Image (tube, rainbow, N blue to C red):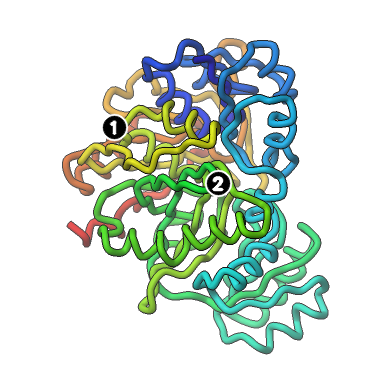
Amino acid sequence: MKILVVGSGGREHALCWKLAQSPKTSSLYAAPGNPGIAQVATCLPTTDYLSVAESIDADLTVVGPETPLAAGIVDEFRAKGRRIVGPTAAAARLEASKAFAKELMLRAGIPTARFATVTSSEEARDALLEFDLPVVIKADGLAAGKGVIVANTHEEANGAIDRLMTMGSGLVIEEFLAGEEVSFIVLSDGVNVLALEPTQDHKTVNDGDQGPNTGGMGAYCDGRILDAFRQEMVMAQVIRPAIAQMRSEGVPFTGFLYAGLMMTAQGPKVIEFNARLGDPETQALMHRMASDFVEPLFAAAHGALDEAPLGWKADPSVCVVLAAEGYPGLVRTGDAITGLDQVQDAAVFHAGTKMENNVLATSGGRVLGVTASGATLDLAIRNTYTEVRKIHFEGMHYRKDIGRKGVKRW
């Protein structure tokens, strides 16, 4: 079948890389794509997604980023009878509004941090008095993974309020949860749910979980992150109630539901919901997935998802993000990237790259995702960093501790 992937980042490159391997894929397109995606798919440099889908007569469209989802791309496609994987604009509010998501969790009885929603700086400062330190402050709307600040002092909290209030219509203030973070992603057709393997993202820019939050500096996928009992606990306490609540409120959730979890001493608690695949989690997931992925995607878009589990390779996979100087703030771009021809034992997924005068150069904050696997998590980590060290561009920054938290489980 003819498949169109919407987006231009590492998540979309990993998706295209996986879908290109399927015998069910007759032709693969990406809009707008990137130089890495161009190696496995035809890139169509446009953001007029419906026109592109109609011009190529796509059998299936898969949406990567959150912005077109929140803008209603799924509603637009369905109005024209086109099959697409993703939630409607109304359902995408689970990500587009943190306040909406928190209120839905309350109605559905889904465990999450105690919170307050505010719409002004004055309200926020009053609400702060109800929380111990550290405290978590979030911009209500979409913020590309950079709208969350953990404040350890009142001074930091007040600074976070001033900074984040400019990003949207309000803030969510939450109690700080202690535990280990896990990304739990499922595919749904609005009723049925197919779980992907748990992954662990690394949000902060520096080693040891230090520095400001980013869109993700790396991730790993390992069958030991959550055992079968805890996976079922997440499904029973978080995923199924969320899907059922959305359906009962007349807003069925279709596509990828991402639960960012904190595994606390009291069990899983939801930090956030996203309405799409995580990035960089997708790179690690696609690298480790043994099953064909076209069939479940088509079934989800068709409303006939089979809950038969996906197959996964035993070897864990690790993705390390190579970021540009200045990320997650103002970044430098236009630097030549070298060494990709030396990489042999990893997949290199492009996130922020461009071709300039036949030279591959940086064009964004997260530039590349280097993803490899190994028989153990420790070996997968070592294999990935061996390949990372072959690549160079001016100002290149990456974390040196991706996956390290998981080694204790081995």
Q: Is residue 329 left or right of residue 376?
A: right
Q: Is residue 90 left or right of residue 270?
A: right
x and y percentages locating residue 398 in the rendered image = 44, 45
Report the mark closest to the observer, 2 or 1.
Answer: 2
Residue 143 visible, this orientation = no
Do the residues under discs 2 and 1 have CB atoms within 8 angstroms? no
Vertical side of 393 occupied by 132: above or below:
below
Instruction: Give the residue pinned by disc 1.
Output: 290
Q: The residue under label 2 is which amino acid type?
A: Gly
- Write the residue at 54% across / 60% down: 242
x and y percentages locating residue 310 in the rendered image = 32, 39
Assess disc 2: are there few (<14), some (14-19) or many (≥20) residues with their C-alpha within 10 Å of its C-alpha: many
Element type where label 1 sits in the image: loop
Element type where label 2 sits in the image: loop
Residue 211 visible, this orientation = yes
| Quadrant in the rendering for residue 363 | top right
Q: Is residue 138 left or right of residue 123?
A: left
Vertical side of 304 occupied by 256: above or below:
below
Vertical side of 197 occupied by 203: above or below:
below
Q: Which label sits on residue 44?
A: none
In the image, 81 versus 64, the foreground residue is 81
Instruction: Give the residue pinned by disc 2.
Output: 190
> Could you tell me which quadrant the C terminus lies in?
bottom left
In the image, 24 versus 216, the foreground residue is 24
- Write the residue at 63% across / 66% down: 104
x and y percentages locating residue 69 in the rendered image = 67, 40
Instruction: Residue lying at the far bottom in this picture: please name it.
Output: 129
| Quadrant in the rendering for residue 31 | top right
Assess disc 1: are there few (<14), some (14-19) or many (≥20) residues with their C-alpha within 10 Å of its C-alpha: some
- Write the residue at 41% across / 49% down: 399
What is the count of numbered marks? 2
Q: Earlier in the sequence, mark 2 or mark 1?
A: 2
